[in-house]
């Protein structure tokens, strides 16, 4: 009679404990609904059950000679071991395929019988072994013997292992470093374990190695700590990036539904950040009624992405409509009820989505404000193409020098002459033609190119002033538009002075225009910037008075020299009595604040008469001239003087 082999027992029990740990953590973290999670649980269960059968075998081994019952149990242990373990390698292959994003319709094996045949054959061999004894047998002394078919099982395992490896290499680019490391770690540990046991059957290292390798897989692949936002429990940008790149690399058809809440800032202003997390959880809860939880991503506050893999496009469209309709009703958060505005976009691969960046572009670009639809799909999304074309044109513009500064003269009513000009930027692109600032300035403000553009304009204006031509023509001052975003940046005052100092010009000849609506938002910083630049000699105008919120305090405190009344105010003064009252009282009030007044958008003689009566200081508009290139501007002013 032999003794219990404690060395083997220890290894098997360790393997079992590792498996139990992995199962517990998987269940605690509720990672059980994805196909990937399920296959992982199958893998770990196979190894765990194998460990159980091996533990039992170790106990029965010493007594197998004594009773037939014990020998039966002994054989049962071997049998279950072989039947289950034969499935491990093919299952692992399936797992790697899913992690690497290989999908198609249904699991890989169903699609490819040829690929599954080694598995089917070897599994069958294991199942019928009690009758055939092709895989293993026992001699009279009830000792286990390997038979020829066991090699087949090893070959099949090696085959699937090899396939998994190729799958991994093929998808290498789309995998995160963490996933790559985990899978490579798995291969190394398992290969070492199997080789040891193959060389010497008494070293039972195989199961232990497999359990250990699967634990590594759990930590690095199954664990989603870095893919999920801790506060909301929703998948994050990183998860979307990695899931999209694997799916696209595998040429899967993806429909992307992007839900953008357009009044999310309102929520941020009125409530604490807890609330804005809270509302995102509520919305995600609703979205989960439409798609599984692992298809919902939150890319930025108020923006959700839903992925539909290999789905039916018309179903996705219906889903987008359901989502959009839901936003007609309010959302309940604690005791509050909130009405949110949302735009839902539906885009698809490969037509509109070629790489993950396309999805992020859609998610991050602001939606046009003049929309008549709430669900955008197909051609509705062309604005994104236009936007990206403009972004490219902007980048090219700076590199290739496609920007040009135009000048629009301003007229002094008191002096009855052209006395100044506003510098206005133009972009002549070789591919998309002329682009106007109303379109590209907002985009440049979002992608940060505005700083370079405004610097370019300032340099052009400085060099124009430096040339002495404006002074000779009696152009006292040139107006330069500033983006308020830029003014708020630290070091801005110094930056402006550095540029103008390079040209050694009289700073009195530059007048900066800032738009009033934004001027109100960060008032303190801006007033310091204005005061400081005014102390250096620059002038300041408030642009677009009468458009956004009219902040009287801003006009007064920011110490503007000139207030520019927006063209819309002038135009509506001609149209209605109310418009006239607004224009008149605005002029009156600004005068009382001792600011000079310029009215924009002057196109007709009648407008000039009206403005003369109100005795404003300056006029600007197409009546005098459109914005024109520098050479034309010089000609215009010269001919006006003679
Ligand atoms: P803005 O500063 O209010 O500029 C006046 C706009 O009104 C100009 O449009 C000008 O062409 C237009 N305009 C002037 N007179 C008339 C008129 O009589 N009738 C009509 N219908 N329009 C008139 P533009 O050049 O397309 O500029 C649009 C906006 O782009 C500007 O509005 C300004 O906010 C921005 N912008 C232009 N150049 C720059 C720049 O160099 N830097 C920055 N940050 N923004 C700029
Ligand atoms: Ca302006
Ligand atoms: Ca303006």
Image: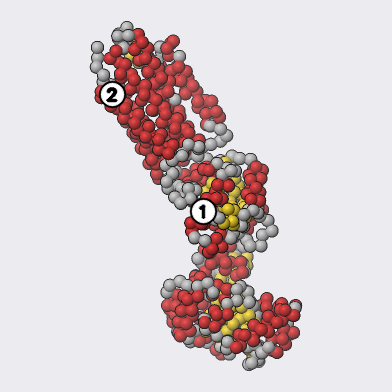
Q: Indicate whether 584 appears above or below 377.
A: below
Q: Position of residue 3 (x, y in %)?
A: 24, 17
Which residue: 44% across, 34% down? 40
Residue toward you, 585 or 187:
585
Name the residue: 60% across, 62% down. Answer: 431
What label sits on residue 153 in the rendered view? Answer: none
Quadrant showing the C terminus: bottom right
Q: Is residue 114 above or below residue 389?
A: above
Residue 56: quarter of image: top left
**2 and 1 marks in contact (CB < 8 Å):** no
Point out the tag, 2 or 1, that comes first from the N-terminus: 2
* Position above or below: 417 against 66: below
> Would residue 633 be seen by someone viewing this image from the given angle?
no
Nearest the camera: 443 or 397?
Answer: 443
In this view, 59 is above or below 405: above
- Residue ranking furthest to the front: 335
Identify the disc placed on residue 278: 1
Q: Quadrant of the N terminus?
A: top left
Q: Position of residue 171 (x, y in %)?
A: 46, 40
* Disc sitting over residue 8 in the figure: 2
Answer with the quarter of the image where residue 336 lies: bottom right
- In the image: residue 615, left or right of residue 539: right
Tell which of 547 and 492 is nearer to you. Answer: 547
């Amino acid at each position: 009679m032999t003794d219990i082999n404690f060395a083997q027992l220890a290894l098997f029990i360790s393997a079992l404990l590792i498996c139990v740990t992995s199962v517990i953590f998987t269940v605690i973290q509720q990672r059980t609904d994805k196909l990937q999670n399920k296959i992982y649980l199958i893998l770990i269960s196979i190894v765990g059950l194998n460990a159980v059968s091996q533990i039992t075998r170790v106990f029965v081994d010493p007594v197998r000679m004594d009773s037939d019952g014990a020998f039966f149990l002994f054989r049962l242990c071997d049998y279950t071991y072989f039947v289950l373990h034969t499935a491990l390698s093919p299952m692992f292959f399936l797992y790697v395929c899913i992690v690497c994003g290989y999908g198609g319709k249904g699991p890989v094996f169903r699609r490819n019988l040829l690929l599954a045949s080694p598995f089917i054959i070897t599994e069958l061999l294991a199942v019928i072994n009690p009758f055939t004894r092709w895989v293993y047998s026992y001699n009279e002394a009830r000792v286990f013997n390997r038979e020829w078919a066991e090699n087949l099982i090893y070959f099949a395992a090696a085959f699937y292992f090899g396939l998994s490896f190729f799958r991994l290499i093929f998808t290498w680019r789309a995998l995160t470093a963490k996933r790559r490391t985990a899978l490579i770690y798995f291969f190394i540990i398992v290969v070492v374990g199997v080789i040891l046991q193959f060389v010497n059957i008494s070293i039972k290292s195989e199961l232990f190695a497999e359990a250990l390798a699967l634990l590594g897989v759990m930590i690095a692949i199954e664990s989603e700590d870095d893919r999920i936002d801790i506060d909301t429990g929703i998948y994050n940008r990183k998860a979307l990036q990695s899931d999209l790149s694997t799916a696209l690399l595998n040429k899967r058809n993806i429909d992307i539904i992007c839900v953008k809440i357009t009044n999310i800032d309102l929520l941020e202003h009125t409530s604490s950040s807890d609330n804005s997390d809270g509302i995102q959880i509520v919305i995600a809860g609703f979205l989960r009624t439409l798609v599984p939880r692992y298809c919902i991503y939150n890319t930025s506050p108020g923006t959700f992405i839903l992925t539909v893999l290999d789905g039916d496009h018309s179903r996705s469209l219906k889903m987008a409509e359901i989502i959009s309709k839901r936003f007609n009703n309010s959302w309940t958060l604690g005791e509050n009820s909130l009405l949110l505005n949302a735009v839902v976009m539906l885009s698809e691969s490969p037509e509109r989505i070629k790489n993950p960046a396309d999805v992020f572009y859609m998610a991050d670009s602001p939606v046009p404000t003049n929309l008549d639809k709430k669900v955008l799909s197909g051609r509705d999304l062309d604005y994104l193409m236009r936007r990206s074309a403009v972004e490219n044109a902007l980048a090219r513009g700076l590199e290739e020098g496609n920007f040009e500064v135009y000048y629009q003269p301003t007229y002094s009513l008191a002096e009855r002459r052209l006395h100044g000009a506003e510098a206005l930027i133009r972009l002549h692109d070789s591919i998309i033609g002329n682009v106007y600032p109303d379109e590209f300035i907002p985009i440049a403000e979002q992608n940060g190119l505005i700083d370079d553009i405004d610097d370019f304009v300032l340099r052009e204006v400085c060099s124009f002033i430096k040339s002495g031509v404006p002074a000779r023509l009696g152009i006292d001052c040139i107006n330069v538009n500033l983006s308020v975003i830029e003014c708020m940046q630290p070091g801005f005052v110094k930056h402006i002075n550095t540029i103008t100092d390079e040209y050694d010009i009289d700073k009195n000849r530059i007048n900066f225009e800032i738009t009033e609506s934004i001027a109100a938002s960060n008032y303190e910083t801006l007033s310091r910037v204005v005061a400081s630049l005014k102390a250096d000699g620059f002038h300041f105008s408030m642009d677009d008075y009468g458009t956004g919120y009219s902040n009287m305090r801003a006009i007064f405190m920011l110490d503007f020299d000139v207030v520019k009344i927006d063209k819309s105010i002038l135009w509506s003064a001609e149209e209605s009595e109310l418009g006239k009252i607004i224009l008149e009282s605005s002029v009156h009030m600004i005068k009382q604040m001792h600011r000079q007044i310029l009215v924009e958008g002057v196109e007709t003689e009648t407008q000039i008469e009206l403005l003369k009566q109100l005795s404003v200081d300056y006029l600007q508009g197409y009546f005098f001239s459109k914005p024109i290139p520098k050479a034309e501007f010089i000609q215009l002013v010269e001919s006006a003087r003679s």
